[in-house]
Amino acid sequence: MDRLSVGQGMIKGMTHGSSEALSVLAHQHLPSDVAERWVGLLRPAVRLETAAASDIAVGQIGGLPRLPADVEWPSWEGHGPLSFIASVDCAMLPAGAVDITIPAEGTLSFFYFDGQLDDGEALVLAEDRESWAGARVLYTTADETCGERDAPAGLTPYPRVPLAAHTSMTAAEPWHPQIRDTFAPAAPLGNRYDHPVCKQDFLDAMGEFDDEVGHQIGGHAHSIQNPVEIEVAEAVTDGDVSWGDPALDKEIGNWVLLAQFDSDDAADMMWGDAGVLYWLIRPQDLAERRFDRAMFTWQCS
C-alpha cells in the first residue's frame, strides 16, 4: 500500500478531547480489550486557544517577543532574521498537564523564516540540513531581565493574539509508529493495516468527534500528512535509512512533540495551504534545556 495522504478521506493526525469522551468513543467502535489498550496510548497535552477576557493568558501567538538585551534576534545566515511566531510562559502552564519535562518556569519563544524577506523563495525543510537555521526555539529563564524587542527591518510582526491554556488528551493516528507497534508491529511504517483501529467506521467516528489541529504543547502531534516523527527521524539520518529498517524505527522513538502552531486567521498566519508548524525534541535534550537541538518541520494539505 502507498504511503497515506490527506486525500484518502481517513482521519488525519490526532484527535483531542477528554479521556472519558475518547474512552466512550473507543468502546463504541472497538472490541473492549482493544479499546482499553488504545485508551492507554492517549497522551496529555496543553491546548493553546485564543484567550477570552476572563481567561488568564499563558502566552501569545504573533506580536513581539520579550528577550534579554544580550540575546540576538534569531537569524538564518545568508537569508536574514526569522519571524517571531509565538511564546509560552512555562510557569503559567497547568502543573503536570503534559508527560514531557517542560521547564517549570521561564519562557519558550518560537521563530521561523516565513518568506517575508524573499517572497517565499527559501524554504525551511527538515530534509535540508542547510535550512535548519531557519527555525529556532529560544528559552529564557525566569531570572533573566527581558524587554519587548522590536522586529528587525523588513519584518512585519503578526497581529498579537493572547493564548489561554486548556488541558486535553490526544490520540495519534493508527499508523503512528507508537500505535502501530502496539497493535501490528510487523505492519509497514506509515500505512494502514488490518486491525480494528484501522477500520473505516472507527476512523470516521474519530474524524467526526474532532479533527481540529490547533496550537499545542506536548501530546501527540496532529500530523497533516505522515506522522511528523517519521519526517524528523528521516531528516536526522540524512535519508540514509530505509523505511522498515529497525534503525529508523529506533530514531523515530527518540522524538516527542514540543509544540505545534496552526494557521491562525486572528494572527494572520497561513502556513502553505492551511498548514502547521511543528517543533520536536529528544526527551534528553528537553530535560537538559537544549532547545537549540529541537527539530522543525511543517506540513500542509
Image: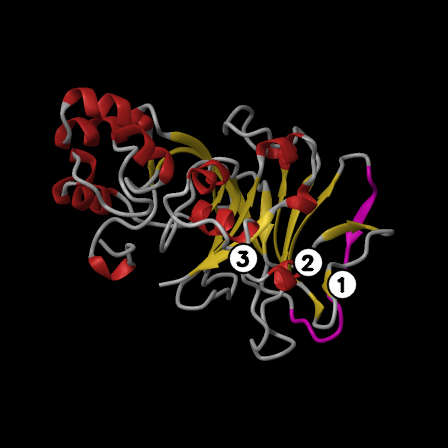
Residue 87 visible, this orientation: yes
Mark 3 or 1, closer to the camera? 3
Q: How is the image coloured?
A: secondary structure
> For the stretch drawn in magenta, what is the main secondary structure?
loop
Residue 138: percent from the left, percent from the top? 70, 47
At mark 2, the secondary structure is loop
In this view, which residue lies farthest toward the right?
70
In the rendered image, residue 190 lying in the magenta stretch gets the answer: no
Residue 73: percent from the left, percent from the top? 76, 59
What residue does disc 3 label?
126
Looking at the image, tell me whether mark 2 or mark 3 is earlier in sequence order. Answer: 2
Going by the numbered disc 1, the residue's amino acid type is: Asp
Please give the name of the residue rendered at 12% of the width and 42% of the height, measured from the top-left corner. Answer: 201
Q: Local crowd at mark 2 within 10 Å, few (<14), some, or many (≥20)? A: many
Q: Which mark is residue 275?
A: none
Classify 2 as above or below 34: below
Classify 94 as above or below 145: above
What residue does disc 1 label?
150
Please give the name of the residue rendered at 65% of the width and 71% of the height, measured from the top-left corner. Answer: 156
Looking at the image, tell me whether mark 2 or mark 1 is earlier in sequence order. Answer: 2
CB-based contact (under 8 Å), mark 2 and mark 3 = no
Q: Depth check: 6 or 52 in front?
A: 6
Going by the numbered disc 3, the residue's amino acid type is: Ala
Q: Which mark is residue 64?
A: 2
> Which quadrant of the figure has residue 199?
top left
Label 3 and label 1: CA atoms lie apart by: 28 Å
CB-based contact (under 8 Å), mark 2 and mark 1 = yes
Report how many numbered discs are placed on residues in the image.
3
- The segment highlighted magenta reads 144-156
